[in-house]
Amino acid sequence: MRAIGTLAHRLAILVYIAFALFPLFWLVKVSVTPNDLLYSEGIRLWPSRTTFEHFRFVLAHSDFPLFFRNSLIVSLATAFAATTLAGFAGYALSRFAFRGKLTVSGLLLVTQMFPLVMLVAPIFKLLSPLGLTNSLTGLVVVYVAFNVPFACFLMQSFFDGIPRDLEEAAMIDGASRFGAFRQIILPLTLPGIAATVGFVFTAAWSEMIFALMLISSNEKATFPVGLLSFVSKFSVDFGQMMAAGVLALIPACLFFLLIQRYLVQGLTAGAVKG
């Protein structure tokens, strides 16, 4: 019975993995399918003939490299700024007792309860007089503002999981509060920082609502908005759109490969205190 249960458990995991990865498989499949076979062959697991023409067109004859660069700039800047701010805020919430601490935490939580679409018009009204519409800087400001609250909660949980005795011992030995933070706490929090950076980077990379509403020119458009360029009034070029989607997965995959050493540790580091 135990062997049957183990087999059933593993089979369920395989089914779940197949279900989760099937959209990615279909994305790749459509991206290498010639246009004349997209509709003529019906539903097949793999086309009878493949081509890389869609990738060549996207890289050489479209604005995808520009969209790609803009998204990379915005996502990296957002991840760096939001994680830095959330790190200091999370440390303060974790280590210091001050008046209004619960109120601050509650307000940060409340910001996560509003649908983003409700805030498009007010944010546009705020950014327009400042000249931050149709600007990558404006997008970074908006993305940082929306990602800092949740990132702050993440960082606070990671700091809560580090014993206070470590930095207190360092301060007894003569280190300042900031010195103890930099030399003792920060290295121990690298897994948490990696997890927070990964979360913020992914959120900024895939965000579309504000990028669509705040950006009005192709020169400043990010990748999610750029995908709309493959949709015309009467047709959709699915092959080129899927090829662009496959290419857009590359930086995210490389990014997570670079931080995977810390990512798994960071996702569980703040789960248990002490």
Image: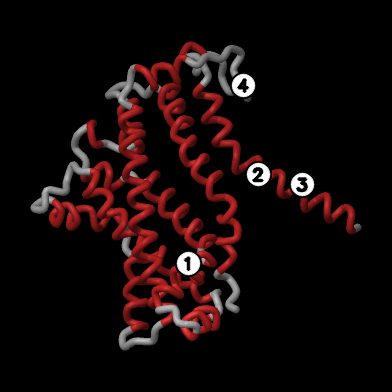
Other residues around mark 3 within 10 Å, as few (<14) / some (14–19) / many (≥20)? few
Residue wearing tag 4: 46
Residue type, numbered disc 2? Ile
Q: Which residue is found at the position 33% from the left and 17% from the top?
A: 61
Q: Earlier in the sequence, mark 2 or mark 4?
A: 2
Indicate which disc residue 11 carries: 3
The span from disc 2 to disc 1 (Cα, nearest Å) is 35 Å
Q: Earlier in the sequence, mark 4 or mark 1?
A: 4
Residue wearing tag 2: 17
Residue wearing tag 1: 186
Q: Report if the CB atoms under discs 3 and 1 are less than 8 Å apart.
A: no
Residue type, numbered disc 4? Trp
Of circles 2 and 1, which is in front?
Answer: 1
Q: Earlier in the sequence, mark 2 or mark 1?
A: 2
- On screen, residue 198 versus residue 262, left or right, reads left
Q: Which residue is found at the position 58% from the left and 32% from the top?
A: 25
The percent coordinates of residue 20 (x first, y second) are 60, 43
Of circles 4 and 1, which is in front?
Answer: 1
- Using the image, determine if residue 143 lies above or below residue 272: above
Q: Earlier in the sequence, mark 4 or mark 3?
A: 3
The percent coordinates of residue 212 (x first, y second) are 26, 41
Other residues around mark 4 within 10 Å, as few (<14) / some (14–19) / many (≥20)? some
Q: Report if the CB atoms under discs 2 and 4 are less than 8 Å apart.
A: no
Q: Which residue is found at the position 58% from the left and 77% from the top?
A: 273
